[in-house]
Image (cartoon, rainbow, N blue to C red):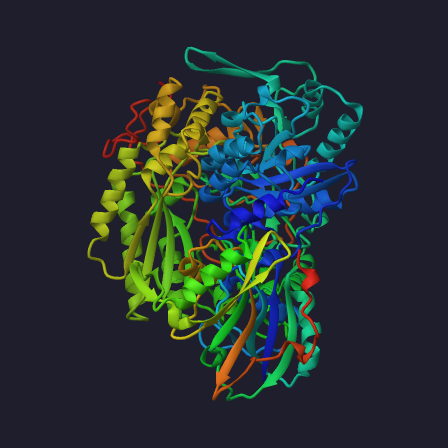
Amino acid sequence: MTSLWPRIEPLLAKVAKPARYIGGELGAQTPVDDPGRVAWLLVYPDTYEIGLPNQGLQILYEILNERADSRAERAYAPWTDMEAEMRAAGVPLYSLEGGRPASEFDVIAFNLSAELTYTNVLNLVDLAGLPVRSAQRHGGHPLVVAGGHCAFNPEPLADFVDAFVLGDGEEVVGELSALVASHNSGGGERHELLLELARIPGVYVPALYDAVFEDGRLGRVVPRASGTPSVVEKRVIADLGAWPYPKQQLVPLVEVVHDRLNVEVFRGCTRGCRFCQAGMITRPVRERSSAQVDAMVRSGLERTGYDEVALTSLSSADFSGIGSTVAGIINDPECSGQVSVSLPSLRVDAFTVGLATEIQKVRRTGLTFAPEGGTWRMRQVINKLISEEDLYAAVDGAFAHGWRRVKLYFLIGLPTETDEDVRGIVTLARNCVELGRRHHRGASVTASVGGFVPKPQTPFQWFGQNTTDELRRKVGILKDAARGVRGLNLRWHDPEATTAEGIVSRGDRRVGAVIEHVFRAGGTFQEWSEHFDLTLWTEALEAAGLTLEETVFRHRPEAEVLPWDHLSAGLHRDFLWQDFQEALSGHGLEDCRWTPCYDCGACTGLGVEHVVASAVPPAGGSQGTGQDLTRADAVPVRLLVGDGAGAPVGATATAGAELSR
Amino acid sequence: MKVRFRFAKLGRVRWTSHRDVARMWERALRRGRLPVSYTGGFSPRPQLSFGLALPTGCESVAEYVDASFDAQLDAAELPARLDPHLPDGVSVVAAAPLDDRAPSLQQEVTSCTWDIDVPGISLDVLQAALDRTLGAATLPVHRERKGRRMIDDLRPSVLSLHAATADVAGSRLHAELATRPRGVRPVELAQALGLELGMARRTCQWIERAGSRREPLAASAVSPDPVLGRAS
């Protein structure tokens, strides 16, 4: 095996944070020198600090290294200074473990967690010394595959990635390895390999599908060959308990985000928040047993030496064993009170504050809630059913128990949103500040506001994203309302970045040219504000003959073929449309873990079931036992199709409005 | 009780920062289940006190950390208990009990000696540069402090410079640099010498008082030679 290390090391003295490029993590595997095994290079297309903690990549890394027919190494995107040094010295993308050139691997696999990293994907393929377009690669080149949440609309990357994997990767990576191994020994053509890949359930090979455009819009995406499925269904592991990974979580030498032990307590979520792609595409809910979680926490802390453990999932307070698991960690004499527990994605109610109080005996600095909408009506539309009383009770509880800072997450640009809803964000946050001041003079509340990007495979996939100007106007409303409010910090996401994300999020195959254009113009690291540039994107759109209006801002009618219609996360299209209509009329939907099935399609279509230990919903407020599903007031807004200006405000028709032209 | 550790940092791990090394120690102490004392307050941290920061990219066989423990431990056993929990290239060379009132490393250490590669430069050329540097009355170097460019005179901090042959192409520089009024880094010495220097390895830290000098903890206290072969 070639090691590039002697050529890499001289570059390190010239770059910032050189330890990102040396590997050496606890848990890193020494590469086996066995050409008989399929060699995978797992790549996260952002910096080491962002990519290293990614649990999906770490899970597959272990599974592939445990198998007898495969081995895996890792790579991350070098920061621009290192990339420049590498290109100047002729050093290609390399693996951290063995310092091996990426082009020597059989498979280069990308994790797609954020759309704005796509230009980095192309850049990394290029840095590997490979042609970026699939059509220009041949049998001597590594196979380029991708998976992760963004793979549910793979079309923007269809020209660059040979195969996408939809859904849980635990089982399918083994099937891919076996196929590539037999192909390697048989010496077949690249085209034959692609045909066989497309027969593996959950694998989408875009080169085998024709995207047909009619009158400037996508007409259909159809397989070219028989044996290639017309709809690719995602993969689901039925029992999370059978996959207790990562067993050897990587402990980096340098500080990274989420620098702690992470234990996944369940996968999937049926809270049904309509804006949330993760909650829709990862169904059904599959819990790990409390006993397994406890064992993973104990052995993980012992092995890693971390003093913080996160119990991860999309809503960890919903885990059936949450109370006993948390108590177990806190009261474990081995931890001697030094281990803190964090629960990302806290529900908003008194129960979770109680839980947080118990677990954060140490380091009680900030607590975060995500009401997402500024008014009850808005929260009914998005099905995030948190009553104001619950929010205030939770925030009051937090301040009463010693927290000084509370952070609230909101979205703007949601369907049917009025200026009243936008101002409601500041009203809520201001009331929270007032509650805090009763407990501490220095109490503060941060309202962090993101721009909503409609995501594929969700009820809002048809909704026209707010224009950049409209989002700016709403940010202006927030700034005006928040001016002079002591103790309230307002943060907002750049509306231009939201717009760029929108181009890629629901783009069709034509957006591939846009991504390539931005990459060739030097537009990498678009997730980073110091590198993001909307002009690059609008110029690229123009060059491709596309517009923001067409790609991002317009509402899609029900009948329109969506670029991801030939890919399935298990959810019925008519369920999603119906849920969208319910949303527009301000009507919530229950969590089906504890109520009868409403047939979204995830369980029935995929032949899997929820795995939930508790037969009763968790204690709590409006998001716990008693969801308030009363119909919201008529929405004072009308959704217009194709006017590009987002929802006009102050119109009088009720919602559920006509979305067809 | 307090224990002073001497450790080496060799090989690839030299690219980690001083802060990274502190985190490695915290985790290693927990993984080794050693009863390290914690600070109080909202954000408890293990009570560790490191000496002079080693610049990122430099190796060392003379790094030190003082740790407080809640229990009495046999210091001689500690290197073997900690070593398996530190990353490749970081190894504990010696450990000894420390008086609770002992001054901190930062207060005590007065100078450091360094071995520095000088690639592609012959012994003669290096010697000439050293003579010129040692003969200079002042050695102004630029540095940035809190965003402002400043000029420092390095000369009082350069205690000795010797040229030696190296096994690789080029030569080697042995330097002793004072730590007061502030620690001089090898990269600043390179600036004063007008030479491009290669990898630097800290070989000793010295405490000089009343004309005699000693190391904070001799390497021979436990292990005769730091495990140089282990680093990649």
Viewer-nearest residue: A188 or A272: A188
Question: x%, y% of residue A365?
Answer: 42, 66
Give above or below for B87 relative to A224: below
- Position of the N terminus of chain A by quadrant: top right
Examine the rendering and report whether any part of residue A283 can be seen.
no
Viewer-nearest residue: A452 or A68: A68
Question: x%, y% of residue A42?
Answer: 62, 40
Left or right of B195: which side holds A618? right
Left or right of A132: which side holds A446? left
Which residue is found at the position 31% from the left and 71% from the top?
A440
- Position of the C terminus of chain A by quadrant: top left
Question: x%, y% of residue A366?
Answer: 41, 62
Give above or below for A148 relative to A14: above
Q: Quadrant of residue A145?
A: top right
Viewer-nearest residue: A509 or A24: A24
Left or right of A653: which side holds A529? right
Which residue is found at the position 62% from the left and 24% from the top?
A205
Give above or below for A302 relative to B103: above
Which residue is found at the position 61% from the left and 61% from the top?
B10
Examine the rendering and report whether any part of residue A521 can be seen.
yes
Q: Report the number of discs.
A: 0
Viewer-nearest residue: A107 or A305: A107
Question: x%, y% of residue B86?
Answer: 64, 65
